[in-house]
Amino acid sequence: MEHLLQLFILVPFVGFFVTLLLPRKKEKSVSFAVLSIISIHLVGLLAFVAYWAFNHFPVLNVKHLTLFQTDDIEIFINFYFDKITAVYSLVGSVIALMVSVFSRFYMHREAGFKRFFSTLLFFFTGYNIVIFSGNFETFFVGWEIVGLTSFLLIAFYRDRYLPVKNALKVISIYRLGDICLILAMWMSHHLWHENITFQKLNDAVLMAEHLQHHYWFAVFVSLMIVIGAAAKSAQLPFSSWLPRAMEGPTTSSAIFYGSLSVHLGLFLLLRTYPYWETIVPVQVLIIVIGLSTSVIATLIGRVQSTVKTQIAYSSAAQIGLMFIEVALGFHTLALIHFAGNAFLRTYQLLVSPSVLSYLVHDMFFNFKPSSFTSQSSFKNSIYILSIKEWNLDFLLHQLLWKPFKWFGTRFNFLSAKLASVLLAVIFVAGLYAYFFQQIIPTAIFDLLPLLFSFIAFVLILKTFAERGDALRAWIEVVSSQLFIALSIALLNENFEHTHILMYLSGSLVSAIVGYVCLKRIKSVDGNIQLNQFHGYNYDQPILGFVFLIAGLGLVGLPFTPTFIGIDLLFSHIHKHEIVLIVLTTLSFLFIEIAVLRIYARIFLGQHKKQYHPIAFKSS
């Protein structure tokens, strides 16, 4: 039975490539292929679950494929199946089929009909990788795919300003969750000296012994898991991204932010529960997050003027209750709650366009204006706060992103040629130190990793805040990758040349491809400044697609060796290297945001030329 698990990932993955080969204008062929693939997946899953139940619900675990192995580390794909997987997979497959049937008519004659269905199948592949994963590495592959497809579907109406802007906002929060998972994996490598599987987490004796020896490190890992789950499931303080994600088509909102994607944070808590179930502060934190989100999201949802926003906050409130249920150990109740909430929100979002006309009709005849009186000042204050969504979006921007953007603008002087030459000289000196370590004084050599890591961090933040030439920003991102590799290679005597090549191989190829794409655009139009949207997907859709793939390869998404290289990179940072891990983590937090920002500014948004149609700001 275990070896059948891979089929539930392969079926939608093959279907994704099939849709890419179909003609763009053949709507019937595209929709038929997608419906056929998801139907096959659902029928096969029903048969598998029935056979699994007939055999008394065994827990299935299979090590599928080893991607990289040395004496110190092994990176492998692992699949796992239990009752949590069964519920999530069945709910996901049924909802994917329903949304696909609905989308066949809802998306009829949309310019991006094929793009929508291809992205939907790619998301479904990532979703299945997440729920069938047996270790953190496999989980992270699917987690990244879900984040990428979220960005693409929120920005589906890519000729409009707000969808693109909100897509960048959402991927920024998702990236924060990604980094928390990377930190959890990093610390786990040092604590277990292996890639721990979810099956081993269910060994109570092993967990008790582990917590006894590494309690505070386990608290750190658990906190990273909780923050990652809260970011993915729109819990406080990250709840404001969920209504912004509704800028995409209604059907993608239904499957992503009403039913499946938004519940993956809950899935992460369910899967890792044996690890943190005895850590009381973590349990209390999850309960506090869930309770506060339920209360505040309910207050916000009750006073919003748009249907999608009301549904978004209602869903976040229910997920907050599920967080509490998981923390208290009521997992069966949480799974039932998840299924009910997923189906309800899918239905509500799919019928939301029709509901609008009913609500307008009702408001016309039954509208009663609210009255503000001095006797209910507290109630009025809560009302105003809820109307303003408790300023969550503003606070996140001011406290999380604005300081880094301000810091990045302080280094605009690095755009000068003299500064570029100086950085090149410093990098060459670092290479010399790497190859001739024995002749460098120890006091100086120990500071070099921090210096190079800080330079990489500065270059990425400068790109994050860049308003100038896109080519220069791209070169700065590529340079930061080289400095990151050098900083960790200098730190660890066991950092082999093959590990460096593994990390840089995908990045450098992607860097060259991305540079050629930007150079091609600059030859068409000399101005590719990042202070505006250029909208070149109108004229250069293939070039835009190639640049997107190059950007994702540069930041290490799981289709280049760089993905494995990043795991190796972090495994070579010791757990006592606090400053280095902070700088490296922040660098990886902002690098994907910076690259996607370049892509969005050059290829998305309203076209700069006035002879192209001008879209409304919002969808």
Image (cartoon, rainbow, N blue to C red):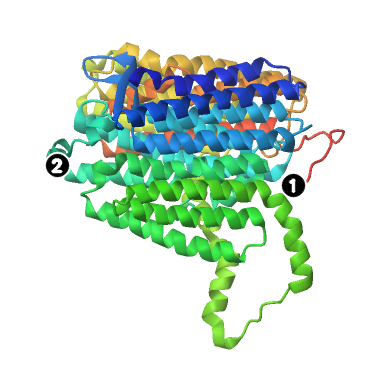
The spot of residue 391 in percent (x, y) is 54, 61
Task: Tell me the mark number nearer the camera, choosing from 1 and 2.
Answer: 2
Q: Could you tell me the amino acid type at mark 2?
A: Ala
Q: Nearer the viewer, residue 565 or 522?
A: 565
Is 231 on the left or on the right of 596, as rendered?
left
Up/down of 304 relative to 372, above or below: above
Label 1 and label 2: CA atoms lie apart by 55 Å
The spot of residue 597 in percent (x, y) is 59, 35
Q: Which residue is mark 2?
A: 208
The spot of residue 83 in percent (x, y) is 35, 37
Q: Quadrant of the C terminus?
A: top right
Would residue 147 be visible to someone looking at this image? Answer: no
Among the 4 quarters of the image, the one containing residue 156:
top right
Local packing at callout 1 (Cα closer than 10 Å; few below 14, some 14-19, many 20+) is: few
Q: Nearer the viewer, residue 444 or 404?
A: 404
Cβ–Cβ under 8 Å for marks 1 and 2: no
Would residue 84 be visible to someone looking at this image? Answer: yes
The spot of residue 14 in percent (x, y) is 55, 17
Q: Quadrant of the N terminus?
A: top left
Local packing at callout 2 (Cα closer than 10 Å; few below 14, some 14-19, many 20+) is: some
Q: Earlier in the sequence, mark 1 or mark 2?
A: 2
Among the 4 quarters of the image, the one containing residue 577:
top left
Is 44 on the left or on the right of 25, as rendered?
left
Q: Secondary structure at mark 1?
A: loop
| Residue at the outermost bottom position | 375
Q: Secondary structure at mark 2?
A: helix
Q: Which residue is mark 1?
A: 617
